[in-house]
Amino acid sequence: MLPDALLINAAILIVTVIGLWAISVRINDVSFIDSFWGAGMGLLAVVSWLQVKPQAGPLATLIMAMTAAWGLRLGLYLLRRWRREGEDQRYARILKKDRAAGRFAFAALTKVWLGQAVLLMLVSSPAQVGVLASGSSQAPVPPIALAGLAVFLIGIFFEWVGDWQLSRFKGNPANEGRILDTGLWRYTRHPNYFGDCAAWWGIWLCCAGAGWTYALYTLPGPLFLTFTLTKWSGAALLEAGMKKKRGDKYADYIARTSPFIPWPPKRV
């Protein structure tokens, strides 16, 4: 049954998180949790698919493959970034007082790892439920899921290419102090975040292919992701920092460039 399968997923997630938390305590840094955000969602999709194997049907396999590809790429990208740049200052600020008071281990578990696990389970619910609900059905992939695949591929293009362009830009010392406003970044201030959002709305549409009831149950996942990418810890947080660092340069970029959805730049 679906609830039992989701409980198995949750148990596997908690065990994995506890293991990663132990590593973070040992190295005194939780920053690599960002790489687990994508990798963990891919893991849950694969675990869901293994629960319906060997009878897994075309839709279940499609959703698993989409989520695993997205999660593996993002996980490796963020892991390399953490190895290159070191501790993320967001987490350093969150845990600063607890680290000074000798409560780093407990705070890392309660303030970072467990909270992220809950959100990861929520956001990835369309993939988990989509795989488990479609299960062994050998019916052809329905049109709504094909539409979801198209939205997903658009998102993957913006996310992967946006991250690649940003990495090349930041890797060039000549760009120090400049604003990336070429390539996809000419049409949206956050092509990678837009792509992330589109990819998960695509996965949600594929979940709808298993039944609109399942899509309704999992709707909070993409809604929360959209909120966090646009208003909470994604674009909003990044732009607050960029305004402080780049001042008028970034203000000019904001004036002419779409905040999220790709659109031709304005003439200012």
Image (tube, helix red, strand yellow):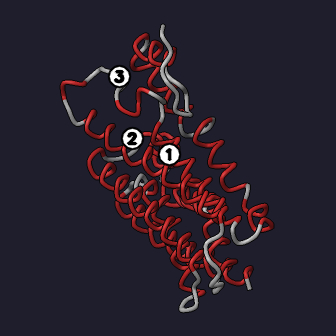
Q: Badge 2 is on which residue?
A: 162
Lower position in the chain sequence, tag 2 or tag 3 = 2
Residue 223: where, in percent of width, then height? 69, 49
Question: Toward which corner of the image does residue 107 lie, by quadrant?
Answer: bottom right
- Above or below 21: residue 108: above
Q: Which residue is pictured at 73% across the width and 56% down the height?
A: 219
Q: Badge 1 is on which residue?
A: 195
Lower position in the chain sequence, tag 2 or tag 1 = 2
Left or right, residue 69 beside residue 49 = left
Secondary structure at numbered mark 2 = helix
Left or right, residue 48 beside residue 155 = right
Residue 157: where, in percent of width, then height? 42, 48
Left or right, residue 224 beside residue 73 = right
Q: Residues within 10 Å of mark 1 (few under 14, many from 20)?
A: many
Q: Badge 3 is on which residue?
A: 179
Q: Are marks 2 and 1 in contact (CB under 8 Å)?
A: yes
Q: Residues within 10 Å of mark 2 (few under 14, many from 20)?
A: many
Lower position in the chain sequence, tag 1 or tag 3 = 3
Mark 2 vs mark 3, foreground winner is 2
